[in-house]
Amino acid sequence: MAWNEPGNGQRDPWNKNNRPSGNKPGLDATLKNLRKHLGKFGNGPGGILTIIAALLLAWLLLSSYTVIGANQSGVVLRFGHYSRTLAPGFHLKLPQPIESVSKVATTNVRSVSDQVRMLTSDENIVSVNFNVQYQVSDARKFLFSTRDPEDTLREAAEAAVRAVVGSHSMDDILTGSDASTGAATAAAATAGVAASAATGVAAVAATTVVKPAVPAAASPSGDTLQQQTRDILQHTLNGYDIGLQVTDVSFQNVAPPQEVKDAFDDVNAAREDKQGTENKARAYASKVIPQARGDAARILAEAAGYKASRIARAQGDTEQFDLILAQYKAAPEVTRRRLWLETMEKVLANDPKVIDGSGGRNIINLPFGQARALPNSGPDAATTGAVVAPSSASSDDAGKEKQP
């Protein structure tokens, strides 16, 4: 059976006509209910004005103050024009729309990251992932100096990174330091070693004048790449006057492109080998130089002692010669004879042979041990090494002087 057959709607399948009829409450009904709740204040012609005044008063009370958080600064606008900046705390203000407050988090550290590919000074391509951390230093400038501060900061940071990377070589960027600084450091270290060696040589040879080594001039820029980027970026932001303070700039990943990564890995391995060799050389120098200084000090002390002994011996010989000269002038013959006897005594003191200058007229008693020490026996042994006394001396005196 069709639902729309005649029957005065009694056959309606949705049974709409059986629902209770009624209209939704309109504005008049709402006002009547409000007057009923307000009592005598809602009756009469001034009831609506009273309601409007109450709502207006509540709106004034709720919009006449603001609370600024501890990490915020409030910028007050009066009819859209800057009025003042509010510090953290509770503040009164004119209600909206006369004054409005924009709150800016000034102590929160914000960050911007990006990845760029750029050319170095030696025309190599390097990929740099950088991160910039910053804070809002001036809330008013942050809100009104530029339309999009974060986008402006990102573009300025990319420009600063390109400026720094473009002024350095690939090796400087991969090592993260200025090559001139490293060269100056190495030159200064070499000069220090040369000065130490010169000091040791001067200690050994006091008469040699050694000029001290002059260290190489240090690089005018000893900052790292990150510090240079931060300085350039902050200078740019100060020129824009957007109220941002850069707190840190970091290069999270600095690497050559993937196409040439293997070649650069080989270069880095060679650089590490070079650094290891230099470290070993410095360690060897640190070990050898103190040892050489000790040897130099020892040789210097021995030379000083030898010098002192030679000078003292020479002075003693001089004084002895002066004494002998005075005696020789007083008695030349006696002094000459005594000098000859003393000299022969020194020469023959350790000789096992006995020389008889008397022609065999004297009897010489030889100790048994000395007699056995004689290598040969016979007439030749007695005449071997015979010493002839001066003609002025008698043979008896010569025989007595030569007996042991």
Image (spheres, rainbow, N blue to C red):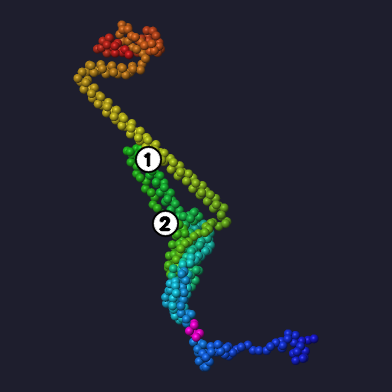
Instruction: Name the mark on residue 200.
Output: 1
Amino acid at the residue labelled 2: Ser
Q: Secondary structure at mark 2?
A: loop
- The magenta segment is 54-59
Q: Is residue 63 magenta?
A: no
Secondary structure, mark 1, is helix
Q: Give residue 24's position: percent from left, percent from top.
A: 63, 88
Say what amino acid the circle numbered 1 marks: Gly
- Does residue 192 show up? yes
The residue shown at (52%, 64%) is 113
Q: Residues within 10 Å of mark 1 (few under 14, many from 20)?
A: some
Circle nearer the viewer, 2 or 1: 1
Q: Which of disc 1 and disc 2 is earlier in sequence?
A: 1
Residue at horizontal 41 percent and vertical 39 percent from the top: 291
**Residue at the extreme left of the image, as rendered:** 330
Q: Residue at x 22, y 18 (%)?
A: 332
